[in-house]
Each structure stands twice: as structure tokens, then as C-alpha cells.
Amino acid sequence: MGATDVETRPPPARRTDLIGLGALLVAGALIAAIGMRLITGSLAVLATVLLLAVVLGLVFAAAAGGPETRRRLAPYGLLKPGMLWLALFYLAPLFTLLRASLSTLPSRFAVEAEFDWNFGNYADAFSDFGAQFGRGFAYAGIATLLCVVIGYPLAYVIAFRGGRWRNVLLGLVVVPFFTSYLIRTIAWSSLLSDSGPIVGTIDVLHLTGLFEAAGIMDNGRLINTAAAVIGGLTYNFLPFMILPIYVSLEKIDPALVDAAKDLYSTAGAAFRKIVLPLSVPGLFAGTLLTFIPAAGDFINAEYLGNPNTTMIGNSIQDQFLVQNNTPLASAMSFVLMIIIVVAVLSYTKLLGTEELS
Amino acid sequence: MSAPTSSRGAAARWGLNLYAAIGLLYLFVPIAWIVLFSFNEPKGRYNIVWQRFTLENWSDPFSNAALTNAFSQSLKIAAISTAIATLLGSMIAVALSRYSFKGSSGINLFLVLPLTTPEIVLGSSLATLFLDWDVTRGFTTVVIAHIMFQVSFVALTVRARVRGFDWTLEQAAQDLGASPMRTFWKVTFPLILPGILAAALLSFALSIDDFIITLFTAGSLSTFPLYINGSFRVQFPPQANVLATIILLASVSLLLIGVIRSTRRGVVGTS
């Protein structure tokens, strides 16, 4: 009964789907295993041949099958190149990172580490770099909070009062981020320097004492303080907060707010009961997109901080690229990732949204 | 009866607008500083204290050979990686938005992962992969790394842009006798192109500006951000500000073209 058109699926549709998905997963697993060097030597050659066979087999299956088969196999074909790239250059590296973190350098000057289930690296990571882990997460957390405080009202005004200037205003939010991240941070170091305009203004207004009492200035200096590092993080990741909040605010029908006001709700109550709950997905995405990169950052701490304000990112970079202690750096990197994954999962559970992008 | 506009309400309204305006201004403070200092004539090797106005840096932005070389490496890397990543990412986006298929929610989740992994983890893990493979790090490894984070970015951006797209248009074209190929190039492609171009532009900018992942995968190669970081201990030439301003101007004009085109045509969601 009713309209029977092309959308009615013939019975083999499910099987075709499973073949397509299976081929994608097998190809992904093979390429990841080769990348991880779990399969080496002649076995790797065999695996490569198998990989090609799976890919070509799918192409032939699509060519031989009817239009319906082609339609069902098409998405898997479209996904394959990108997904295999991610399997090889995102998944496999995480595995080699884990393996490196359980390895030992044979001597202090050795370059190549040997894998020997050395969990000591993790013990060292916690005992030697606990403070850096703590600071990394604390600074990132404060910066994320500041981004909400600055970014939410800005996104709100653009979304609800921007009118036909909305796109232009949104463009203005993005524009600063087309200049180099490093040069932006260097500009802040110049702005905050002892001879810079900000310290000069504070001096003229005789507010140095006030800023020192608030813990922002240290001995009359702004640069090389924790406040400068947090300020730099806030600045550099602010658009990642504004854009998702804007996207979720923009979707809200203004008529809802009008309706609430017609029903004698105050502006404040209308905001709390309607706008704020509906913007939770944006806030959620924004806080993650700000907190995650901020927690691993080391540029702000390097250019705006001092040796006592280094974050975990600085330590990983130093251990990996300067001290050449790959195992220890890998362990720290892995711990950072695990902590963030756990934090993101519990945060997702708390706010209960699936939309991340 | 609705919304009594008391003077208190108006004050709150303007207070919020002012607050937002200050927020927007804050975003531009260091940008203005960068542009201003591209006109500075520095004393010594550090362009961080204002001396006097000059046009000299602009008359010859490429006078610093090492900086120019690093900059052109960055452009090359961005061009290659963006081209490949845009193709791969758009294919994923079309698969996800055009078809409903088994496993799409898993794919969605997997795509978000690289973007929610801190850059330092991505960089250090890729470095361990290349160490494991005994590959010398350089131009190719940087391109590989950039494609990796751009693919996810392009896929999610394009997918968001084509979300409201009416796929029955394809059906209509085929009902009128167009072949699937012809349908794609004449109907689908022109409609999703603005989204693809926007994603390509943004990921090009991400590539040029990337520092952390590049640092771990570059070996002895120098890119624009790597050069600035590496030379900062000894010098910070004003040409860096000039090049940064040029990137800014180029991307702003591209953005402007995009905004003007999309507001004129009014198709496919803007920005």
C-alpha cells in the first residue's frame, strides 16, 4: 500500500552493506597493522596484496552489480581513501607512541629505543612532571572559563543583534586567526613587555599595586607571569569558543523568546529557560575545542611565561626534541591523551550531547 | 504589552553591546600591533620595540633569504596537502551526507577523534611512527601529517555545509535522462562547490600556520612558523610582520569574495 518507489529496498541490501563495511574495516585493519609494523617482511607484502585485492574486489563488485548494489557500495568507496589515510597516520601512530612509551634507551646517547615493557617511563612521567601536568590542566581550565565569559556574550550579540551584519561580524571574529599563531603570540609578548603600552598605562594610572594584589602582575611585570600565559591561551583559542556557540544560538527561533516575553517572562528568565539550554551543544563543543588544544599547548608558556609556568606541552616537547628522551616523552604524551579522553567522556556523559562538530 | 523597554532594560542592552564590542576589539589588538610593526625600523635584530616609521620592509618583503625560503616551503606544503585533503575529505563528506549506510555513526565518531586529540599528541605519535619506519623526516612527512589533520577538518566542514542540501535534485536530473556522471558534474558538484572551497581555504590556512605537528615531523626542514620560532632567540626581522600581514590581507580578501558571493546568491548556508 502507499507509494512504492525506488526507496523500497530489495532483500540483499543488508548483505551488500555488510560486504561494503567489512571491506572497509578489513582494509583499515590491514593498513594499520602494516603501519604499526605488526606485520613485517614477506607477510607485509602479502598483506599489501590482500589490501589491494579487497579494494579492487569492491570496485569489481560494484561494477558487476546493478544500480542498487552500486548505490549501496558507493559510500564505502567514497570513504575508503580518507579512512585508510587516518588508519595509517592517526591510528597506527597512537600505537607506535604506546610502544615507544614502554621502551628503554640502551644508553643516554642512544637514538633508538628498545621495546621491553618498561613501565618505568610512566612512573617517571608522574613523579617528575606532576607539576607540569597540573599547571597544564589548570591554565587550560581557567583559559576555557575566560573564553566562555568573553565569547558567549559576543556570540549572543552577533546572533541576536547582528541583523544583516551577522556574517560580517562573524568574519571579523575569524579574521585575526589568519595571521600566524606564533607571530600573534610574539605580538602579545611585545604588548605585555615592561616597556610596552599596557604596563605603561597601568603605571600612569598608578594601578600596579592593585594588579599585583590581584595576582596578575608580579614585581610590576606582566610578561613572564602565569597571568600572561593564561591570557595568551584565552586569546589564541577564543574563536574556537565563539564559533560553535554562535552556530547553536543562530538556530534558535527568536519567536520562542518573544513568546516567552508575551507570557510575561522577564528577559532574564527567558534567557535562562530558553536560550541558555538551547545553546548547550555549542557551549559543549566550544569548551572542548578550547580546552583540548590549550591543555597540550606550549607556545604561550614558552613566549609569555617563565620557567615556573611551564605546561605539560613544554615538557613533552623538551623531552622529545631537545633531550631526545623519546620513551619518557611518549609516556607523557600518552598520559595526556588518556586524561583528556577520560575527561571528554565524563563531560559528554554530564552534558549528554553527541554533536561535536 | 510585550517587552517593556524601560530605561534599565535599554541600559542593560547597551551594556551588553559595549561588552561584546570590547571583546571584538580585544581580538584585534595584537593584529593591529603586527601590522603597525611591519612599518617599524627596528634598532638591532629585534622588531619588538617601536622606533620609527618606515616603508622599507614593505618595499622588499623577501630580502631575508632564509625567511623567504621557509615561507615558500610553507606555501608548497599547504598547496599539496590542501589539494589532497580536500579531495579525500569531500569524498567522506559526500558519503556521510548523501547516503545512509551501515556504520555511519562509527565513522562520524572516528572523524572527530583527530580534531579532539591535542596537537602535541598527534605530533609526537607521528614522530614515533616515522622513527619506527626509519624514515627521514622532512617535506614529505610534513605533508603527510598535514593531510591527516586536514582530512577530518574538511570532511566535517563540508558535511556541515551540505547538510540542508536537497539530494532529490539528483533524482530529478536522472529522471530527465542525465547519466550519473553528468548528474554529478552538472547538478551536485556546482551546489557543493562553495562548501568545498570554504573548507579548502580554511585548511590551507591551518596548514600554513601549523607549528606543533610540523615541529615534530619536519626534521631539518624549515617552514614559516618553524623559522620564526627557531630564529627568535637571535633575531625577529620586520619582514616576518610583513609576510604575516600579506597572509592576513590575502585571506581577508578571499573571505570577502566568499561573503559577497554567498549573500548575492543566497544558496547553501553561509559561513
Image (spheres, coloured by chain):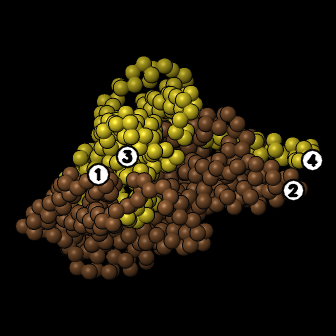
Horizontal and vertical percent position of residue A274: 74, 58
Residue beneath disc 2? A263
Horizontal and vertical percent position of residue A129: 44, 71
Q: Mark 2, chain letter?
A: A
Q: Are marks 3 and 4 in contact (CB under 8 Å)?
A: no
Of badges 3 and 2, nearer the viewer stands: 2
Same chain under badges 3 and 1? The reply is no
Residue A290 visible in the snapshot? yes
Q: Are marks 2 and 1 in contact (CB under 8 Å)?
A: no
Residue beneath disc 1? A67
Side of A321 where A356 appears, left or right:
right
Same chain under badges 3 and 2? The reply is no
- Which residue is farthest left? A42
Q: Amino acid at mark 4?
A: Met
Residue beneath disc 3? B90
> Chain coloured brown: which letter?
A
Colour used to depict chain B in the structure image: yellow
The mark that comes first in sequence, 3 or 4, is 4
Q: Amino acid at mark 1?
A: Pro
Quadrant housing residue B81: top left
Residue beneath the point at 75% across and 52% down: A256
Residue beneath disc 4? B1
Element marked by disc 3: helix
Side of A217 where B212 appears, left or right:
left
